[in-house]
Amino acid sequence: MTGAKSRPSGGKSGGSKSGAAGGKSVAAVHGVDPVRVVARDVLRAVRERDAYANLVLPGLLRERKISGRDAALATELTYGAARSLGLLDAVIEAGAGRSVEEIDGPLLDALRLGTYQLLRTRIGAHAAVDTSVALARAEYGAGRAGFVNAVLRRVAEKTAEEWVEQLAPQDTLGHLAFEYAHPVWIAQAFADALGARAGELQEVLAADDARPTVHLVARPGEISAEELALVSGGEEGKWSPYAVYLESGDPGKLEPVREGMAAVQDEGSQLVALAVTRAPLEGPDGGRWLDLCAGPGGKTALLGAIADIDGFHIDAVEPAEHRADLVRQAARGLPVDIHIADGRESGLTPGYDRILVDAPCTGLGALRRRPEARWRRQPSDVKDLVKLQRELLSAAWDLVRPGGVVVYSTCSPHLPETVSVVSDMVRRTGAEQLDTRELLPGVPDLGDGPGAQLWPHRHGTDAMFVAALRKPLE
């Protein structure tokens, strides 16, 4: 779910509405650097169509045959600028003497790219300014390109640190949020979730603002993590027995990924699935498992592969047809049945041994992998999401057998979506809350319990929350 768009992703949409395709002809006709054109076109798609950068960029790189170091630079410029929008826009406003809302969208895209290069990369000022001016000139001509040139030259007069010192709020929280390009409300949510260790906030924001390592999952029964690491040139993960870290390269080109023996999946998500399989039941495991919020299918596939080894079965529920298709693709060849239904009213027969509720959430724990998301989410999104989370957890409770376990997870550390939802469930139902930390052996610093909270700065994973509830025997 996407919240209302906030000011940093705004800008007037005047000028070309060509979107991603428009940049191709610009590059061809005017000789503009194709790497910057790709980055500009993705930023434009994000701004104009609320597109997702991590979905748009790979297709453009393939379409325009950009690879190797050029692809790496395009990725850095695109994701970096998308992550940094709040900071970039504040600096642009200072340099332009006007609000970003008063700047035509395509010019704003070029300014954001140039400002990002000036403040957050080692690219020389001359190259950063000239390539951005060239983008504006190719689309608008010399007059408006002069505006971009003037603004960026003002931006280049100060270092990133000097701009932060000039523009950041004076309070500690606001200063850190500005410096590491996060909305203040998200920084506050992280601080609240850290609790007594709120002094780690700077580390969390810094980890959230850095390029994440690609995590692969080795499908159980098909390939081991050791074999996958050897084939991919990666490194075996620290916490999940199926995880491999890939520092560089296109995972889609790896043979194990192409053949369905491995996939891209954050190690934190792998640990969530493992917690489902490890939670102690009362009575035998009949092998009837349920993933109540299955799309896009990563956790479903890992659960299905583990279930397959023991002859167990997974039901997977997903209300959206296109996401159900992704689940089918991810779980192809596994003992998984997909049901297109609302998890709150699935129509399934109760009696499941294990149920995963990987609930829709704000996604605040995966902002490093979804660069524009932090500027789309709003505090007002939380209320409706919490209502949905509680309803899904209640539905799972009705479907689990006495002695069975429901594992609740979110890709968010935000307390209203995590501890509060689980506490409310325990209060209303008398559920036995298991110490989830015991289900993740060897993983340190998971919090005070009984739920477990992963963090990017501590574990190198997304900030996943996991709680396990067991239904008392009747």
Image: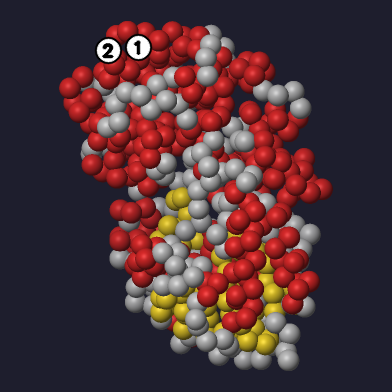
Whole-number angstrom distance, CA of label 2 to CA of label 1: 6 Å
Q: Is residue 164 above or below residue 21?
A: above
Dot 1 surroundings within 10 Å: few (below 14), some, or many (20 or more)?
some
Dot 2 surroundings within 10 Å: few (below 14), some, or many (20 or more)?
few
- Residue at x 68%, y 72% (from the top left corner): 468
In the image: residue 462, left or right of residue 321: right
Percent from the top left, x then y, of residue 127? Answer: 38, 16
Mark 2 lies on a secondary structure that is: loop
Percent from the top left, x then y, of residue 340? Answer: 41, 72
Q: Work out which quarter of the rendered image holds the C terminus and state it.
A: bottom right
Q: Is residue 325 above or below residue 86?
A: below
Relative depth, front residue between 296 and 458: 296
Relative depth, front residue between 329 and 305: 329
Label annotation for residue 144: 1
* Furthest residue toward left: 29
Snapshot colouring = secondary structure
Where is mark 2, residue-wise?
Answer: 141
Label annotation for residue 456: none
Residue 61 sits in quarter? top left
Label 1 near label 2: C-beta < 8 Å?
A: yes
Give the amino acid type for the residue marked by disc 1 in the picture.
Answer: Arg
Mark 1 lies on a secondary structure that is: helix
Percent from the top left, x then y, of residue 387? Answer: 63, 61
Give the amino acid type for the residue marked by disc 2 in the picture.
Answer: Gly
Relative depth, front residue between 123 and 465: 465
Q: Is residue 398 above or below residue 249?
A: below
In the image: residue 258, left or right of residue 411: left
Q: Is residue 205 above or below residue 363?
A: above
